[in-house]
Image (cartoon, rainbow, N blue to C red):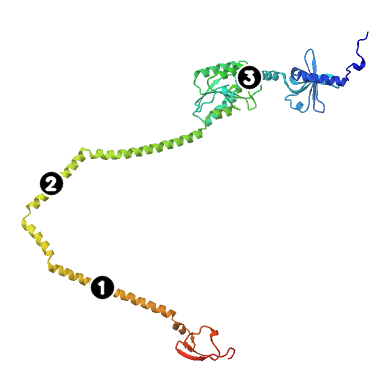
Amino acid sequence: MNNSPPTSERNILAPSQLNTLTRDLLEGAFGMVWIEGELGGVSRPASGHLYFALKDARAQVRCALFKPKSQWLKFRPVDGMQVLARGRVTLYEPRGEYQLIIDHMEEAGEGALRRAFEQLKARLQAEGLFEAARKRALPARIAHIGVLSSPGGAAVHDVLTVLRRRFPLLSVELLPVPVQGPLAASEIVRMLARADQSGRYDVLLLTRGGGSLEDLAAFNDESLARAIAATQTPVVAAIGHEIDTSIAELVADLRAATPSAAAELLSRDGSELERSLQRQRGRIDSAFARLRERSWLRLDPLQHRLAAQHPAARLARGSECLRALQQRLLHRTSQALQPPQAQLSRLALRLAAQHPRLRITALHQAVTHAHQRQRSLTGQHLARAAARLTELGRTLNAVSPLATLQRGYSILLDEHGRSIRHASALQPGQRISARLADGRRRLRVEPEGED
């Protein structure tokens, strides 16, 4: 008996439809995957895309890396190379084969380290070891630095060169540790613990030069990351170049892009410190000068008082007072012993000075002197008056019409003796007179236009 459903009830799909459903199922179920294997059948056609297979001892997967990502690879893919790739699972519908569309590929050794780095980074970040709130601030004044690095490395040379240039007074101690190799991480952890327990250092600087991910493996070690987080002394990390970022730098209290940059961050500018010291010295000198001046101002009165109380000064003042008293005593004694005749002589002299004849002579001299002075003042007053009169005469003569007549001018007068100032005041036949410098003449006005 045939139990198959009728043809009209069957869900019949075309191959293309089935491949589309399969592709959607694969892409939705798997998403992005990492795969490690050996390259095989590598080909790069003129389109620039890269086609290859990833295989192991039992199976292989077809892969495609499209342009431009195929041109961004840091290595040249060849058959037999072990690689680590990341891509999404899909179905190549024309052939009905599933494949990987790759968006990232790297050599397998580097890829394993990178994968371990990313896993450790994610775990430590989840624990909060990278949080800024956990990290310690650097001291405001750094005097002693411990540098954990390889003694012969270029990083130490760069650090010491910058520190000597910027701040030679800074105490720097090199704590030698290996920075590469299987024992490097444990040695760094041991030296870091010893330096932290000593309490000698204000800051610990962990540094080395650049290198590959494998070269920097010691600084991506979990034990070193936890040792850095456990220290009480602030730790600054400068590992590799600016593009390199290690686990140790992420855990450290401060990360510097390069060893030289770390030295710049940890050292003060010596020239600025010197300028600051000069300013402080100037303020100290000014303060001492003011203190010295105030001390002298207080000391001078004290010195004067002390000098005044000196026995020699007191003895000198006593001697001077004694001499003054002796002089007064002698003067009083001589006055008391003077004979009465001497006193009479003085009185006679005073009386003679008041005699009327002497007073009359003095008054006569005073009157004579006053008379002479009066005559002198009168003569001076008359001379000034004469000079003033002469000056007024010259001024009057300068403005007098007579002076104008002397220069050839005349004054026309009508029959009433009034001066004629305008031609319009004259009428033909009118009798007028002209006053000249030497007399008058009678004139008659002729009509205009007649000669």
Query: Can residue 180 be seen here?
Result: no
The tally of labels here is 3
| Image-quadrant location for residue 98 | top right
Mark 3 and mark 1: Cα distance apart in space: 126 Å
- Where residue 115 appears, as percent x and y from the top left, is 68, 19
Nearer to us in this view, 173 or 350: 350
Look at label 2 and name its amino acid: Gln
Query: Can residue 36 be seen here?
Result: yes
Look at label 3 and name its amino acid: Ala
Disc 1 element: helix
Q: Which residue is mark 1?
A: 374
Mark 1 and mark 2: Cα distance apart in space: 58 Å
- Where residue 331 appears, as percent x and y from the top left, is 11, 50
Frontmost of labels 1 and 2 is 1
Disc 3 element: helix
Q: Residues within 10 Å of mark 1 (few under 14, many from 20)?
A: few
| Image-quadrant location for residue 263 | top right
Q: Which residue is mark 2?
A: 326
Nearer to us in this view, 207 or 304: 304
Mark closest to the chain's N terminus, 1 or 2: 2
Look at label 1 and name its amino acid: Gln
